Each structure stands twice: as structure tokens, then as C-alpha cells.
Image (tube, rainbow, N blue to C red):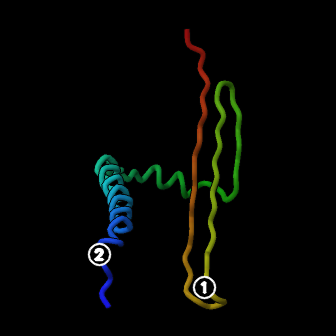
Amino acid sequence: MPLPVLPTLPVLTSFALRYGSVALTTYAVSRQIKIGRRDQSEEDAHDKIEEGVTLRRETGQHNATGRFRRIIRLGKSGPGMEVDASVFARLKFRKTD
């Protein structure tokens, strides 16, 4: 027995509006994102960070670095994936007139 179209129209419209708006928003945001550049000196700086978190405070600024490096494996001898995430942070305070 075929499904009547009229009773399902509100549900279909709801899905179309919801997922259509998500698709349109994703498209609009992706058009605004600029393609980043790759700088080898920055890549080398990320590779030099030691694993863990470090904090440093100097006059007028706070610095932090962090690195997380793990190998995630499916099963004991299954395929693995290396995750290497690093971050630099600097917070500066300057008095203005």
C-alpha cells in the first residue's frame, strides 16, 4: 500500500528546512574561510615542543605551550593512527592611554 503524501508533507518540509539551512550555512561559512599557508619555520617550532604543558610568565605577558602525542591502535596488533597535536598561546597585556 503506497504511503499517502499529504500526511507526510509537514515532516518532509521540516526535514527539508532543517537540513537545507544546515547545508546553506555550511556552504556560506566554507566560502568565507581562507586557505592557510604552510611555513616550514612554524612546522619546525611545533616539532620542537616537548610533550606536556608548559607555562611561563614575563613582565606584561603569559606564554603557554602544549603537546599531545599518542598512537591509537584498534586491538593489540591492529592498525594504528598517530595523533600529534601542539599549541602555542600568548596573552599580552598593554596599558593604553
Determine the residue positioned at 50% across, 55% down: 44
Determine the residue positioned at 34% across, 58% down: 17
Q: Which residue is mark 1?
A: 74
In the structure shown, which secondary structural element does the residue marked by tag 1 occupy? loop
The part of the image, by quadrant, that contains residue 23 is bottom left
Nearer-the-camera pick, 13 or 52: 13
Residue kind at label 1, given as amino acid type: Leu
Are circles 2 and 1 on residues that touch, CB within 8 Å? Answer: no
Nearer-the-camera pick, 73 or 50: 73
Quadrant location of the N terminus in the rendered image: bottom left
Q: Determine which of the numbered discs, if any, sits on residue 5 in the image.
A: 2
Residue 90 drawn above or below residue 17 = above
Position of residue 72 measured from the top left corner of the image (x, y, whole percent)? 61, 77
The part of the image, by quadrant, that contains residue 26 is bottom left
Q: CA distance from mark 2 to mark 1?
A: 46 Å
Position of residue 94 measured from the top left corner of the image (x, y, whole percent)? 59, 20
Residue 12 drawn above or below residue 62 = below
Position of residue 47 measured from the top left corner of the image (x, y, whole percent)? 55, 58
Q: Residues within 10 Å of mark 2 (few under 14, many from 20)?
A: few
Position of residue 61 measured from the top left corner of the image (x, y, whole percent)? 64, 30
Residue kind at label 2, given as amino acid type: Val
Q: Is residue 96 left or right of residue 43?
A: right
Total numbered labels: 2
The part of the image, by quadrant, that contains residue 5 is bottom left
Quadrant location of the C terminus in the rendered image: top right
Mark 2 vs mark 1: in front: 2
Determine the residue positioned at 57% across, 60% down: 85
Q: Residues within 10 Å of mark 1 (few under 14, many from 20)?
A: few
